[in-house]
Amino acid sequence: MDDITQKVYNHMKSLSSKHGFLPTIRQTAEQLNLEIQDVENAINKLQQLGKAVVTDIPAKSIIELVD
C-alpha cells in the first residue's frame, strides 16, 4: 500500500472508531491536506485490496472499511 493510501486508511479507520462513521472524501482531503483526487484514488486502491467497500446510490456514496 502506498503512503497516501495508508494515510487515508489510517485516518478513516481512526475517525470511524472514534465517531462511529467515516468522514466524506472532501473532509478527508481537507483534514489530511490532500487533493480530492488523491483521496478518491486511495479509496479505489483500498477497494482493490479488499480493505473498503463503496456502495454508490444516487447523489451519494457510502464507504465502509473492511477489517
Image (cartoon, grey):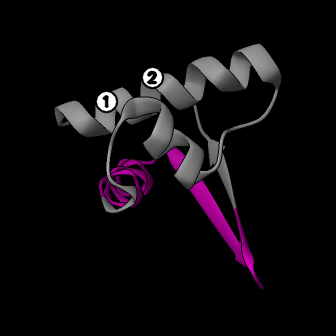
Disc 2 from disc 1: Cα separation:
6 Å
Q: Mark 2–mark 1 contact, CB under 8 Å?
A: yes
Image quarter in which the C terminus is found:
top right
Residue closest to the far right: 20
Tell whether position 42 is magenta. Answer: yes
User: Looking at the image, which residue is at 44% across and 45% down?
Assistant: 29
Image quarter in which the N terminus is found:
top left
**Left or right placement of residue 3 versus residue 26 in this view:** left
User: Looking at the image, which residue is at 40% across and 60% down?
Assistant: 40
Q: Which residues are magenta?
A: 38-61
State the residue in front, 38 or 46: 38
Which amino acid type is marked by label 1? Gln
| Mark 1 nearby-residue class (10 Å; few <14, some 14–19, many ≥20) | some
Examine the rendered structure and indicate whether residue 2 appears above or below residue 53. Answer: above
Q: Which element is circle 2 on?
A: helix
The residue pinned by badge 1 equals 6
Examine the rendered structure and indicate whether residue 9 appears above or below residue 53. Answer: above
State the residue in front, 51 or 57: 57
Residue closest to the far left: 2
Q: Which numbered circle lies on residue 10?
A: 2
Residue 27 position, x and y percent, is 58, 44
| Mark 2 nearby-residue class (10 Å; few <14, some 14–19, many ≥20) | few
User: Looking at the image, which residue is at 44% across and 55% down?
Assistant: 47
Examine the rendered structure and indicate whether residue 4 appears above or below residue 57. Answer: above
Q: Quadrant of residue 60?
A: bottom right
Residue 18 position, x and y percent, is 74, 14
